[in-house]
Image (cartoon, rainbow, N blue to C red):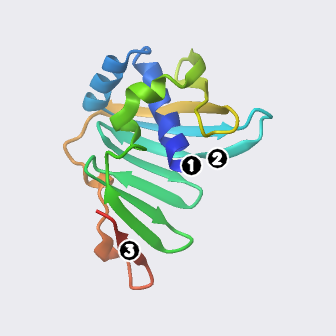
Amino acid sequence: MRKFITILATLFCLQAAAQDSVQNLISMLETSRVSISYSYGDSKGNELGSGMATIQGHCYSVVESGSKYICNGTNLWTINQRNKEIYIETAGGAADIFGNLDKILENVSDLVIDGTRLSFTFSMQGIPEPIACKATILRKTDASEDLSDFTVDTSKYDRMWVVTDLR
């Protein structure tokens, strides 16, 4: 769930730059690399999470609460620093925000865009109450052909790490 909200916040930050158009968003993601900071909370104003994300096309890297999520568009690595665990799975499943952008956009309301900052409310079946999200675009550059930031070499982790390959 945390990964879902994380990527959702990232996407809507990008949506602001794309002027609310899914096609413009997809086009921008294909030609840009965007870094953002984000936070989300409950209706009472309590922060539930925050983090940093970088997105380019179907690739992304998200850091939040001691975990890192890295996707190269084909594989998704979930790295849990506290437990020293890495899960590898195939990208594009039902929870893959990039593969289901149209459905995700249907669950957003109260979108406010102010320069590089935006806020919105996300509601979806299965989430007990709406989630308030805020994001800020920190950097936007041209897309890079070097996608090494979106891949994990598990051989660099010592034997104390548990690597579970679910592909």
Which residue is at the front of the view, 98 or 33? Answer: 98
Element assignment for label 2: strand
Element assignment for label 1: helix
Question: Which disc number belongs to residue 2?
Answer: 1
Q: Identity of the amino acid at label 2?
A: Gly
Quarter location, residue 125:
top right
Left or right of 57, for residue 1: right
Quadrant (top left, top right, bottom left, bottom right) of the C terminus:
bottom left
Compute the Cα span from label 1 to label 2.
Answer: 8 Å
Q: Is residue 128 above or below residue 30?
A: below
Q: Identity of the amino acid at label 1?
A: Arg
Element assignment for label 3: strand
Q: Identity of the amino acid at label 3?
A: Val
Q: Which is more N-terminal, label 2 or label 1?
A: 1
Relative image position of residue 75 (x, y in whole percent): 29, 55
Which residue is at the front of the view, 106 or 74? Answer: 106
Q: Is residue 17 above or below residue 160?
A: above
In front of the other: label 1 or label 2?
1
Question: Are discs 1 and 2 less than 8 Å apart at CB?
Answer: yes
